[in-house]
Image: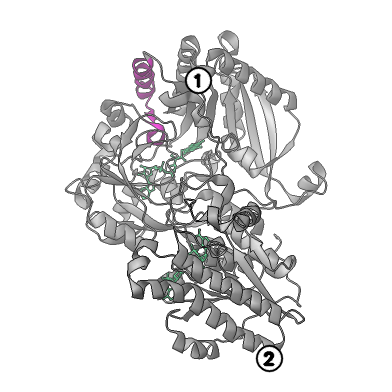
Amino acid sequence: MELSGWARYPRFDSTLFAPATKAEVLAIEQKLAHYIARGNGRSYGDAAIGSRASISMLGLNRFGAFDPETHLLTVEAGVLLADVIATYLPKGYFPPVVPGTKFATIGGMIAADVHGKNHYRVGSFGNHVQSLHLALPSGEVVFCSKEENRDLFDATIGGMGLTGTILDATFPLINVPSGWIQEETIVAPNLEAALDLLSNHTEAAYSSAWIDCLSTGKSLGRSLVHLGEHARPIVVEELKPGADLFPQPSVDTLTLPLEFPSFTLNRLSVAAFNALQYRKGALTAGVPLLKGIDTFFCPLDGLIEWNRIYGKRGFIQHQSLIPNEKAPTVLAEILRRFAVRGNASFLASLKKLGPASSGLLSFPSPGYTLSLDLSIDRGLFEFLDEIDALVIKAGGRIYLAKDARQSPQTLVAGYPGLERFRAIRAKVDPDSLLTSRMSERLGL
Amino acid sequence: MAHLPENSPTDPQSLLVIGGTSDIGRACALRFAEAGYTILLAGNDAESLAREADDIKARSGAAVSLHSLDILKTETFTDFIAQLPVLPDIVLTAEECTGDQHKAESDLDYSSMIMRANFESPALLLGLFAEKFTARNSGVLIGVSSVAGDRGCARNYVYGAAKAGLNAFLSGLRNRFGNSEIRVVTVKPGFVRTGPIENVSLPRFLTAEPRQVAQSVYRAAVTHRRDVVYAKSIWCLVSAIIAVIPESLFKRMHL
Ligand SMILES: Cc1cc2nc3c(=O)[nH]c(=O)nc-3n(C[C@H](O)[C@H](O)[C@H](O)COP(=O)(O)OP(=O)(O)OC[C@H]3O[C@@H](n4cnc5c(N)ncnc54)[C@H](O)[C@@H]3O)c2cc1C
Ligand SMILES: NC(=O)c1ccc[n+]([C@@H]2O[C@H](COP(=O)([O-])OP(=O)(O)OC[C@H]3O[C@@H](n4cnc5c(N)ncnc54)[C@H](OP(=O)(O)O)[C@@H]3O)[C@@H](O)[C@H]2O)c1
């Protein structure tokens, strides 16, 4: 069956298995070579496409235990974050880290060591994982934590499925006062102002900036900076009188039947969307707003299957990390180049990242991360290679969970933990039974 | 902190699910657990029962107990009921074996197994509980049946015939308890999206999620008190239309 990531580029044939239990996962893997675990396919590129076979983990969707004393939750690896939120938010609990989609699986969140809008305060999801069970290609199931099998634990967090299949994991939930986020929006007239705002507001529980990536000149990098807090009941009452303190979050995605033809999305429509978003945000700037969990954390989940607006060709998301000192100049240069080239999308987000987790291939480390979507056209890959060179020169890296095209050289230069990762991988998978299209492309 | 589900003291407090590892059975168990019910899960695969019990406990905080039962061993049913820790307030049967129609056409034992799993077994169990409920003068009996029982068709008539038998049994029970506190609910789920990977061949407007089935069952049993429930009301119409097609025409249709 043809598989792709969220960006629908690239696509490859891979036999998809759908085990319903842990025992079935082990039984299937015993017979396979060149396979990889697949969560919900929300990584953008070729990470979750097995060279020959892919194992859908979505059948492993049972919860294992929740301890109200320690707030520790144990779930099978195919459980969707949306399920965790829908189950526990009404009871006053919330995941410590939420990426921009809640339709990721817990296994996928560990394998990509995902970050949220609070990375500068709490780190990545891997920072919170207490332990996990990993099925090695040998068929052995290993318990890994910070205390036990530490090397394997660190290689698995951010390891893109290449150390084995995560079967279950344990992580804590946090207490929240309501199911609402109190949001404040600040207008940043240019990039420098946006970076300043993000670094001056580290007291905020959550922050992120939306960049109008088509603006140029003096307003290059003009942004809306969003700050968020879990709203206290009194704030909910004030801003939305009579509202349910814990509204039931959704678990479903509906599906748009139609694939938009590639030509409906062009530079003009993107520019119009950008301008509209910017004005809408600017209008409400300074006014505290109450937002639902979904609209604050995962606004794109509401635009069901928006990835299809790029048509059959798919698209590329480019997400880079630029260390703090270099950020103002290098981000400005990158934004300038994107603006000049002009095929960037409405989606350009800027987040502040804090200290790295122990994951050897983990993406976040102190600095800023910029991500944008680009429709695939002639010359794009060459153009992005040049952007990558700027990123690497600044001491940054390109996020594997979004990647479909970076070069092996870019990878080596960007990930200092790669050597150790490879050594550990060689130990647990000496015959390279675990391979994805990504691992082949990058020689991971 | 957050609100826990409301449950008035007069409501039934425990639900027994037979076939507790089926997709529909476990969704129902979870729905009732979220409403504060104590759950009893019965089935013959201890490992998968334990997995479902943990899932329900972790999600809802409800108490869940496990009870071993092979639905084809009818001679064990009386003991099975006697050994339950409580006489449940609600009993739901959701075991199944849709089976392979083609195989059933030539394999006598196999055909018999499908009929027993879908008719004999749930009917006997619900009948035994009906006796216990009569003595107590309360309880809800819920049989998960199927629209396949509304009219036999080539694709699955062995399974369908068994479900038709179950439908008749349930309506008979309901008639028997028509003037009492005991209630009988027939569930005809229609197409249900079961299994881990979405079955793309099922038309969306006719297909329910197990969660939706569970919600309809909960409403019918507890809040809205209905006798026969379809998870998607369109099935009520589909069934009505199928029922009025003249046999002379029906026999030539491909269903
Ligand atoms: C709209 C949108 C917004 C996003 N926002 C963010 C964000 O803010 N921050 C961020 O960090 N990421 C973000 N992402 C990326 C996403 O969170 C990650 O790609 C995540 O890994 C997706 O999870 P998945 O279950 O879909 O995994 P998949 O995409 O299916 O797989 C991703 C990787 O995990 C591996 N994997 C999956 N399950 C297992 C398992 N059980 N055992 C071992 N390996 C496994 C796969 O092999 C693959 O390498 C976003 C994605 C989308 C679509
Ligand atoms: N799915 C649909 O589309 C659909 C449509 C209409 C009606 N229904 C009806 O809904 C009900 C549940 O269906 P489902 O699809 O959710 O079922 P399912 O997931 O296929 O599960 C089948 C269940 O039957 C149990 N079972 C089988 N043989 C058994 C035995 N000898 N002893 C004890 N238990 C046994 C299985 O238990 P083990 O795990 O222990 O084997 C399992 O719990 C059935 O009555 C079915 O006819 C389903």
What residue sits 48% from the left and 27% below the top? A371
Q: CA distance from mark 1 to mark 2?
A: 80 Å
Residue A328 shows which numbered tag? 1
Picture layout, residue A9 above or below residue B111:
above
Task: Identify the magenta region.
Answer: A380-403
Magenta span contains residue A234: no
Disc 2 is attached to a residue of which chain? Answer: B
* Amino acid at pointer 2: Ala
**Dot 1: what SS?**
helix
Closer to us: A372 or A123? A372
**Dot 2: what SS?**
helix
With A261 as the anchor, is A386 left or right in this view? left
> Which residue is denoted by mark 2 in the rendering?
B135
* Residue B32 percent location from the top left of the image: 63, 68
Q: Quadrant of the C terminus of chain A?
A: top left
Name the chief secondary structure element in magenta: helix
Closer to us: A33 or A196? A33
* Amino acid at pointer 1: Pro
Picture layout, residue A357 above or below residue A321:
below
With B246 as the anchor, is B68 left or right in this view? left
Disc 1 is attached to a residue of which chain? Answer: A
